[in-house]
Image: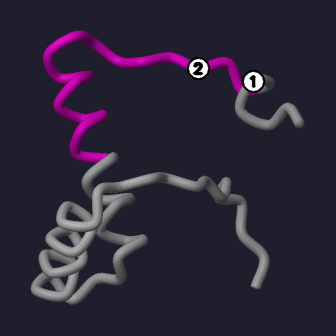
């Protein structure tokens, strides 16, 4: 399956990871979907308080 998402490797303390996985299950999301949701909420909160973050398109897709 093709995707435009960037794969990352994130390290967590085991207890935190298990708790996030628990929340994901309660929300009927995969762990990955829950982490994406949390990141999105973090960015939205930041932008609400500090203004929109602008990113040049060429930076997003450079290899």
Q: Magenta part of the protein: which range?
A: 40-57
Alpha carbons under labels 2 and 1: distance apart: 7 Å
Dot 1, crowdedness within 10 Å: few (<14), some or many (≥20)? few
Residue 32 image position (x, y, % from top left): 42, 71
| Above/below status of 36 relative to 53 | below
Quadrant of the rendered image containing residue 57: top right
The residue sitting at 44% across, 53% down in the picture is 11
Task: Identify the image quadrant of the N terminus.
Answer: bottom right
Q: Where is mark 2, residue-wise? A: 55
Marks 2,1: beta carbons within 8 A: yes
Left or right, residue 30 beside residue 62:
left
Residue 3 image position (x, y, % from top left): 72, 69
Left or right, residue 23 beside residue 8:
left
Q: Where is mark 1, residue-wise? A: 59
Helix, strand or loop at label 1? It is helix
Residue 29 image position (x, y, % from top left): 28, 83
Residue at the far front in the pictured view: 14
């Amino acid at each position: 399956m093709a995707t435009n998402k960037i794969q990352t490797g994130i390290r967590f303390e085991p207890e935190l990871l298990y708790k996030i996985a628990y929340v994901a299950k309660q929300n009927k999301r995969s762990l990955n979907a829950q982490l994406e949701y949390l990141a999105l909420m973090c960015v939205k909160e930041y932008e609400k308080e500090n203004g929109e973050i602008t990113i040049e398109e060429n930076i997003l897709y450079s290899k």
